[in-house]
């Protein structure tokens, strides 16, 4: 049984390695070039920054603004103006801040989902869609 687990673990690790190699060979060359130049994936980092900022906005204000209000930070990251260490430190700080807001219980979004409200919205959307 132990030998089977080891073979299975090796097989899975090998499969993951092969998938990674295929991904590297087939990925967007411009994006790969930027990652090599800056030491991290700028597009991924840009979305990380945007999502952490929007998460705080959702928790504190209870709204999701699709037009990121913190455009400056996002653009700086997408242009490679942040070092990898700055990015990671910033993300860890934001994660800590979001956790503190959540643990405080003082946030704008409800803690539990209102199933009836969601059902009503779904019904309304289906009825609207069928009426068109």
Image: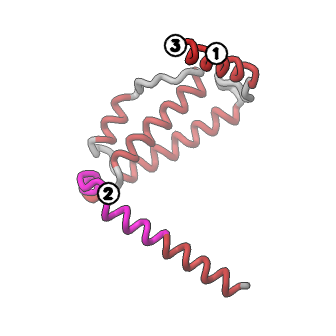
Element type at mark 2: loop
Q: How many numbered tags mark residues here?
A: 3
Q: Position of residue 82 (x, y in %)?
A: 33, 45
Are discs 1 and 3 less than 8 Å apart at CB? no
Name the spot of residue 69 as percent of width and height, x first.
Answer: 41, 24
Q: Residue at x 65, y 22 (%)?
A: 122
**Mark 2 burial class by Cα count in 10 Å: few <14, some 14-19, many 20+:** few
Q: Which residue is mark 2?
A: 27
Q: Earlier in the sequence, mark 2 or mark 1?
A: 2
Question: Which residue is painted at 52% across and 24% down in the image?
Answer: 64
Where 6 sits versus 116, above or below? below
Magenta stretch in the rendered image: 16-35
Q: Are marks 2 and 1 in contact (CB under 8 Å)?
A: no
Which numbered disc flags the more N-terminal residue, 1 or 3?
1
Left or right side of 60 for 115: right
9 in magenta: no
Secondary structure of residue under mark 1: helix
Looking at the picture, does residue 105 appear above or below residue 24? above
Q: Are marks 2 and 3 in contact (CB under 8 Å)?
A: no
Rounded to the nearest angstrom, the CA distance separating label 2 from label 3 is: 41 Å
Tell which tag, 2 or 1, sits nearer the viewer: 1
Which residue in the structure is indicated by mark 3? 132
């Amino acid at each position: 049984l132990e030998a089977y687990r080891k073979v299975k673990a090796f097989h899975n690790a090998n499969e993951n390695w092969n998938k990674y190699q295929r991904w590297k060979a087939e990925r967007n060359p411009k994006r790969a070039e930027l990652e090599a130049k800056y030491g991290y994936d700028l597009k991924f980092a840009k979305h990380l920054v945007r999502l952490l900022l929007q998460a705080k906005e959702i928790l504190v204000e209870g709204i999701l603004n699709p037009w990121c209000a913190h455009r400056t930070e996002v653009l700086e990251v997408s242009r490679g103006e942040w070092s990898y260490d700055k990015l990671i430190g910033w993300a860890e700080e934001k994660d800590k801040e979001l956790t503190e807001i959540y643990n405080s219980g003082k946030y704008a979004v409800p803690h539990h989902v209102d199933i009836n409200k969601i059902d009503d919205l779904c019904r309304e959307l289906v009825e609207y869609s069928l009426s068109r």
